[in-house]
Every structure is written in C-alpha cells, then in structure tokens.
Amino acid sequence: MAKVLFKNAFVVSCNAKIGDVPGADVLVEDTQIKQVGAKLDGAGAEVIDAAGMILMPGMIDTHSHLWETPFKGRVSEGWGMEYFTNIHPLVSHCTPEDSYAAIFAGHIESLCNGVTTMFDYNTSINSPEHADAAVQALKDAGIRGFMGYDFRGKAPNFTPPLAPSAARFKDVERVRASIPNKPRDLIRLATCLSEVAPDNMDAVVKEIEFSRGIGCYMSWHCNKAGELEQIGARGLLKDDLLPAHGNYTTDKDLDLLGEVGGYLTSQTEAETYAGRRSMSMIARGIRRGVRIAIGVDVPVIGNLGLLPQMRLLHFLQRYMDGAIERHEGLVPVVRRPGVPTLHPRDILEIATINGAGALGIGDVTGQIAPGFEADIVLMDTRNFGVAEGDPAGHVVLNSSSGDIDTVMVAGTFRKRGGKMLGVDMSKMLAGRVAARNRIYKAAGEVPGGLHKTYWGWGDGK
C-alpha cells in the first residue's frame, strides 16, 4: 500500500471538526486520507516537506464544456449572444478525435490549476464515438470526473447521427455498462437534460426517470423562470438534479430547490461577461437554503480553474450587496445580519464542500479528513507569506494559479513542484491546436475571427 506523509503544512481542511491547523501533518494511504494531526508517524511513507504551504482540498468544477478548450479566448470580447452565434456552430465540425484532444487538454489545464473533480457537460456528442472519446480523455487525464452525456444533441447546420432525447437512451446505456458509477470511482457518468419548457416536459420527464433508473446524476441549463417549478409540479425535483446558471429563477423556484436540499451551480465569469444575466439568484438562493457551487463553464472566455471564479464571485456579491443597501437608503453601509452575503470562507466551501455535495460525493471528496479520498492541493506561500486572518481569505483573495505547487487525486500525484506528471504537455498542446485548426478549416473560420453583432442585428456599426 502506497503511503505519503505531508509534513508541517498549514492545513485548511474544510472539515468542521478538524478546522484550520498550522504546522500539521497529513498521512495518505493508497487513495485515502488516513490521519490529520501533529507529528504523525511516517514509517514506510514518502515524506513531503509542506512547510510554507497551504494544504487544502482540491477544487471542484461542477459545470464546464471542455470540448470548447481548443478555442481559448475566442469570445473574450463577446457581448450579448455572441457566444452562441460564434461557438455553437463549431460543434458540427468536431470529430471524435477533436473531441478527445479538446477534452483531454481541458482536464489537464484544470488539474494544473488545482481542480481535482470536473463535471464535463458534454454538448459535443454527435455520435457514440464522440461519447467514447470523452470517456477515454477523462480516464487518460487522471482527474476525478463526470462525463455529462447531453440529451439535446444540438448541432447547428448539421444532423448528428445520434438523434436527441429518448433516441440517445440506448447509447447512454451502452456507456453506462462500462462505468460502474460507484461513489468513489474516478470515472462517473451523468446525464444532461433537454430544454425544460412547457412544450417539452414529457421528454424531460422521460429523461429524468431514465437517468434515475440507471443511477446517473443529472444537470441542465436552467435559463428560464419557472423551470424548477415545472419539474416540482411533476413530483420529480430531488437533490440529484443540478441546475446550472439559474439566473432567471423565481423565488418560488428557489424555495422548491431549497426544500429538497438542492444545489445551484453558477459560472460567474460566463454569466456576467455578456451583460445579459441577473446575478440576484445567489443571495436569494442562499436565503432560501439553496447551496451554491461553481464552475468555469466556457473556456472560450477565461482559463480553466476556479480561483478566478471564486474571487469574482466574492467581489460581485459584495458589490451587489452594497448596491441594494444604498438603494434601500441603508447609508452608511455597515454590517447587519445576512450582509454581506458571502465571506471568503463561504467562497472556499462553495468550491470544495458544496461542489462535492452538488455531485453527490460529499462524503467522498472536498474535505481534508480521515476517510476522504486524497484529493489534495498544496498552495505555495513561501515567497510572499500567508495573508492575515482567515486563511480562506488567502486562498480566495491573495493567491493565483501560479501558486498551485502540488495536485494529488485519489492518492496519485498529478502535479508536483509546479510540474505536471504523467502527461506530455507539448503533445497535449499540439493536439489541442491541431483540433482547433481542423475545425476552423472545416467551418471556414480563423483564429481571432469573432463575429460581432451590433444594434440593428447586423455585422457593422
């Protein structure tokens, strides 16, 4: 049995009993954390000097579309609906080989930036071969992950071999047969629902019942008011359904989600960059018992990794809290119950504990405690020191992806001393670029060729 002992770390456990422990040791045996404490016995273990490091749980991205990884930054200047008009048509030209290169690269970038669990919401499954490529990329990357099999099958200007919704059930069953889907498995299968709308609810109901029948967690793009109420009216709303975004959810929607102990996953950069979405659902949800998780969403805007999302969520919610206080005449702005809505500790838990809970693995990962899987990040503070006060504040407000020194998943090092292990980074990058170039050629596009939409609905000012 492999044993690793991390010595003298500043442990930020995200565990209520253990708390934050300066100068602590963490013993890993095989895939799990065995002990957390002072001066642990390291007999037979590889000893890692973690002095000057924060040892924390790996972060959990609960919603990203990794097939888009090759188009890094394509929509960084996007506004309004330009993400949809520029990116969605590209899926029609994505081959299984492109899918593998893109998704593998996305997992590796996420690992490098401290993400140890990923929900890949895969909207590029045009064929069974695309699904197989996504699963293989997940296996090869060595990250803990969910391959989210999308039922919608949208591909503009192209009819995929796999028809949408129930027509995909047989292939989902085929993939599920090769994935045990046990809670501690690195590789998990999930499903992603079709559009939740009054005229499509019969199909959605079948998808939910089918997914539960084969033991799969579910997620969907919750982009309209009343979607949660629609599901609840059919008696199907449970905590194995993870709504993404939810920017237009009503208070009734959020009440229902809170009542079943549900989560909402928000992608702060993607939801704010284009000027279209409300972000009030975060505070409204929290007040109603909804737990928040986060993800990157689309790597065509920003880089994969949760630290930027965490910081933006912290500042955005504080800005919104202050704006409401001023609007209601509560000046000067001072602390009162529930204001501010979020603190750095809450943000850290959103990226760890809540992410695990949202995916149904809250007793598996997201905490540094005995019995949890050894999904661990070491954050280097040796150059500039640790910020004062709550160490969660250092993680959220005083760190960057460049500080991620070590990443371990299920007891296996994936990054160490700032270097990725077990992956040919040059080959990975070459594969990503080749996929981009092939897709652009097939689509008649070029790098940096963002199509902008101006008032009047034309290309032009």
Image (tube, rainbow, N blue to C red):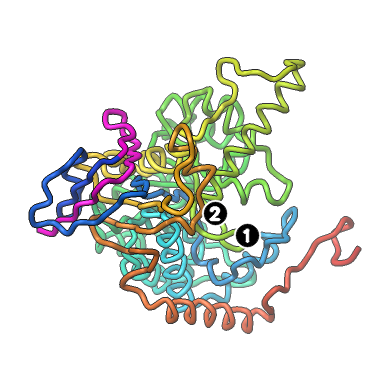
User: What number is the disc on residue 301?
Assistant: 1
Closer to us: 59 or 222 = 59
Q: What is the tally of numbered marks visible in this picture?
A: 2
Q: Amino acid at mark 1?
A: Ile
Q: Position of residue 106 (x, y in %)?
A: 46, 65
238 relative to 449, above or below: above
Part of the protein shown in magenta: 1-22
Vertical position of residue 50 compared to residue 255: above or below: below
Q: Magenta stretch: residue 3 in it?
A: yes
Q: Amino acid at mark 2?
A: Asp
In the rendered image, which residue does mark 2 sit on?
297
In the picture, the quarter occupied by the N terminus is bottom left
Instruction: Residue 158: give x, y in percent of width and height.
Output: 60, 72
The part of the image, by quadrant, that contains residue 406 is bottom left
Q: Find residue 311 and report its horizontal and vertical position in percent.
A: 56, 44
In the rendered view, would you say 437 is above or below 394?
below
The answer to whether residue 210 is visible is no
Query: Residue 105 vs residue 276: left or right?
Result: left
Q: Is residue 172 left or right of residue 290?
A: left
- Which quadrant would residue 31 be assigned to in this image? bottom left
In this orientation, which residue lies closer to the viewer: 139 or 429? Answer: 429
